[in-house]
C-alpha cells in the first residue's frame, strides 16, 4: 500500500486570486519595482515573514491544483526563489506528501531568508539532495515545483540549473512555477538568451507582484495559468504596465434617441488588386462594431462596386473619395492596400480626423521619411492616430533590422513607437501591448494562437475604427478593441476545444455576438 495521502491546504487568510477577469486593470511590476516593493514590505514585518507567507501560499496552491498528487519534486535554486520552494516543501511534507527537494546551490551561501527556510525544512525532516535530477520512484512524478529562479534571474541557466530546467520541461506530470517560470525574463517575457531554456509550467503563482513578462512575449506559453498572491501586503506602487481588464462602466450602451449619425462614419482605404477581401473584412468589422455608416474605397482597378454579403457597406470610387471631407471621418488605411496605398497617405496624415494605420500603410511610412514627419507632425498637432503593427512592421517603423529586436522587449518597443510618432500603438502578438505617449502601457491578456490566421489583423483595425467614434478616446478604443478581438478568439477555442485557425469572417461573427 502506498504511504502517500492527499492532504489539506495549509490555512491562510489570503485567498489566491486569478489574474484575469478582475474589474480594474491589474498593476504589473517589473523586476526592479518588485524588489523595491519587497524591501518596503519587509520593513513593516518581522524577519522571514514574507517568505513564510510565500512558501505557505505555494504549498496551498500545489494542494489545490494537484490534490491527489502523492509524490512532489521541488527543484530549488540558489536564491530566495529556492527559499520559497524549501518553505513550500516543508508544508507539503507535513501534509503527508512524499516530497523530494533538489537544492541546486551552495547551502552555506544561501541568502538569509532562504537559509532560514532550509533550516525549517531540514528540521521538519524533508529529504533534500543536491541532485538536478528528479527521484526515480514513479509515484514521485505527480507534481513538480519550479523554484529555481525568480525575479533574481539574470542570465540563461547553465550547468546543474540548466539540467534541472530540462527535467522540468520533460516532466510527465503537472508543473507549478514559483513566481516565474525559471529562465524567463520577468520584464520582457523572453528567455535570457535566444538559446536559453525556460521552464514550461501548467501554472505559475506570482508572488507579491504580477510581472509583465508573464503576459507578453513568450511568457504566456511558459507560464500556463497565472495566479497571484500579494502576500497580504496590499502595497500600491506605480506600475510598470497594466494588465488591461474591461469593466462594464466603459461600455456606454446606446440611448433610445440616438441615430446612425451618432455613431460616426468610417472610411476604409485598402484592398489593392488581389487583396480586396482585406478591405471588406475591415469594413464589415467596423459595421458590426457599431459605426453609423461605413464607406469602402478599394484600391484595385476597377474599384470594387458592392459587397453582396454585406450590402450595408457603401462603396465609393476615387472621385467620390476625393470629394469627401475627411476631417469628421475615422479612416482605416492599410488592409491589403499594397504599395498603392502610399498615394493616399499624405492626405490621410494631414486631414483625417481619426486615423487607424495598419499593415501596408505602416510599411509605406517606415520606408518614407516624408510620411514619417507628417505622422510626427500630426501627433504634435494633437490629431489622433492608432498604429497597429505586428513585430516586423514595428521594427521597420523603429528603423531596426529585425522583429526579434522588438520582441526582445515588447513594452519598450511599443513605448518608443508611441513617443516617437505621438500615436496610440497596438503592438500585436502574444500579449498585445497598447501604448500611448507619456502613459503607462497596458498588456492585453485575451487571445490565443487561433488568431494567427489571414485577415484577423484587418478585422482588428476595422473593429477599432468602428468603436472609436462612439464616445471613446483613441487609447480606450484601442484597448477595448484588442480585448474584444482576443476574447472572441477565446470563445472560439472554448467551443472547439483546440486552437485551430479562426477564419477572419467567423471572427467578425463572434465579435458581433452571433450565432449565440
Ligand atoms: N526575500 C523574501 O522574503 C521573498 C522572496 N521572494 C522570492 O525571492 C525571489 C527573488 O529572490 P532572489 O533575489 O534571491 O533571486 P532568485 O532566487 O530569483 O535568483 C537567485 C540568484 O541566482 C543568481 N542567478 C541568476 N541567474 C542565474 C543563473 N542563470 N544561473 C545561476 N545563478 C543565477 C542571481 O545572482 C540571483 O541572486 C522572488 O522571485 C520570489 O520567489 C518572494 O517570495 C517574496 C518574499
Ligand atoms: K521559478
Image: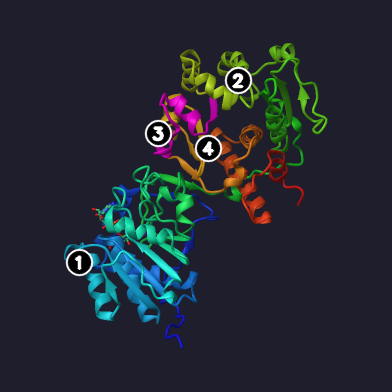
For marks 1 and 2, the one nearer the N-term is 1
Q: CA distance from mark 4 to mark 1?
A: 44 Å
Marking on residue 107: 1
Q: CA distance from mark 3 to mark 2?
A: 32 Å
- Residue mark closest to the camera, 3 vs 2: 3
Q: Is residue 79 above or below residue 253?
A: below
- Image location of residue 41, percent across then percent down: 29, 59
The residue labelled by disc 4 is: 428
Residue for badge 3:
405
Report helix, strand or loop for mark 1: helix
The residue under label 2 is: 352
Question: Residue placed at 43% from the left, 30% from the top?
Answer: 402
Q: Position of residue 55 (x, y in %)?
A: 34, 69
Q: Secondary structure at mark 2?
A: loop
| Quarter of the image where ligand 2 sits | bottom left
Residue 377 image offset from top left, x and y in percent: 47, 18
Amino acid at each position: 500500500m502506498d504511504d502517500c495521502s492527499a492532504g489539506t491546504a495549509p490555512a491562510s487568510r489570503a485567498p489566491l486570486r486569478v489574474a484575469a477577469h478582475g474589474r480594474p486593470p491589474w498593476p504589473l511590476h517589473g523586476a526592479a519595482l518588485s524588489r523595491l516593493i519587497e524591501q518596503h514590505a519587509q520593513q513593516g514585518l518581522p524577519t522571514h515573514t514574507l517568505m513564510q507567507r510565500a512558501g505557505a501560499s505555494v504549498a496551498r496552491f500545489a494542494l489545490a491544483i494537484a490534490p491527489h498528487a502523492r509524490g512532489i519534486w521541488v527543484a530549488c535554486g540558489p536564491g530566495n526563489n529556492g527559499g520559497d520552494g524549501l518553505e513550500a516543501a516543508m508544508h507539503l511534507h507535513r501534509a503527508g506528501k512524499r516530497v523530494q527537494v533538489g537544492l541546486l546551490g551552495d547551502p552555506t551561501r544561501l541568502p538569509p531568508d532562504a537559509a532560514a527556510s532550509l533550516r525549517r525544512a531540514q528540521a521538519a525532516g524533508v529529504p533534500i539532495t543536491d541532485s538536478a535530477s528528479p527521484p526515480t520512484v514513479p509515484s514521485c512524478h505527480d507534481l513538480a515545483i519550479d523554484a529555481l529562479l525568480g525575479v533574481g534571474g539574470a542570465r540563461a541557466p547553465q550547468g546543474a540549473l540548466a539540467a534541472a530546467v530540462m527535467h522540468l520541461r520533460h516532466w510527465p506530470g503537472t508543473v507549478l512555477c514559483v513566481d516565474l517560470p525559471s529562465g524567463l525574463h520577468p520584464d520582457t517575457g523572453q528567455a535570457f538568451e535566444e538559446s536559453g531554456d525556460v521552464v514550461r509550467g501548467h501554472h505559475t503563482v506570482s508572488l507579491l507582484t504580477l510581472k509583465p513578462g508573464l503576459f507578453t512575449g513568450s511568457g504566456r506559453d511558459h507560464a500556463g495559468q497565472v495566479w497571484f498572491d500579494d502576500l497580504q501586503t496590499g502595497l500600491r506602487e506605480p506600475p510598470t504596465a497594466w494588465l488591461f481588464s474591461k469593466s462594464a462602466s466603459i461600455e456606454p450602451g446606446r440611448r433610445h434617441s440616438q441615430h446612425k449619425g451618432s455613431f460616426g462614419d468610417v472610411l476604409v482605404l485598402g484592398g489593392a488588386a488581389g487583396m480586396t477581401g482585406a478591405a471588406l473584412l475591415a469594413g464589415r468589422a467596423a459595421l458590426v462594431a457599431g459605426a453609423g455608416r461605413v464607406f469602402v474605397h478599394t484600391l484595385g482597378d476597377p474599384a470594387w462596386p458592392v459587397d453582396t454579403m454585406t450590402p450595408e457597406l457603401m462603396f465609393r470610387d476615387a472621385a467620390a473619395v476625393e470629394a469627401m471631407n475627411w476631417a469628421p471621418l475615422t479612416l482605416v488605411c492599410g488592409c491589403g492596400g499594397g504599395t498603392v496605398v502610399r498615394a493616399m497617405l499624405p492626405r490621410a496624415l494631414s486631414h483625417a480626423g481619426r486615423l487607424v494605420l495598419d499593415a501596408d500603410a505602416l510599411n509605406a511610412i517606415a520606408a518614407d521619411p516624408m510620411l514619417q514627419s507628417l505622422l510626427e507632425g500630426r501627433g504634435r498637432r494633437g490629431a489622433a492616430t492608432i498604429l497597429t503593427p505586428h513585430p516586423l512592421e514595428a521594427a521597420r517603423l523603429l528603423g531596426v533590422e529585425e522583429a526579434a529586436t522588438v520582441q526582445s522587449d515588447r513594452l519598450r518597443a511599443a513605448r518608443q513607437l508611441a513617443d516617437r510618432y505621438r500615436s496610440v500603438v497596438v503592438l500585436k502578438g502574444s500579449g498585445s501591448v497598447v501604448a500611448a505617449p507619456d502613459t503607462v502601457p497596458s498588456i492585453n491578456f485575451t487571445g490565443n494562437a487561433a488568431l494567427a490566421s489571414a485577415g484577423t489583423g484587418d478585422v482588428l483595425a476595422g473593429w477599432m475604427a468602428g468603436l472609436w467614434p462612439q464616445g471613446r478616446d483613441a487609447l480606450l478604443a484601442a484597448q477595448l478593441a484588442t480585448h474584444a478581438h482576443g476574447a472572441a478568439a477565446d470563445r472560439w477555442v472554448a467551443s472547439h476545444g483546440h486552437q485551430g485557425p479562426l477564419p477572419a469572417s467567423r471572427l467578425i461573427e463572434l465579435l458581433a455576438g452571433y450565432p449565440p
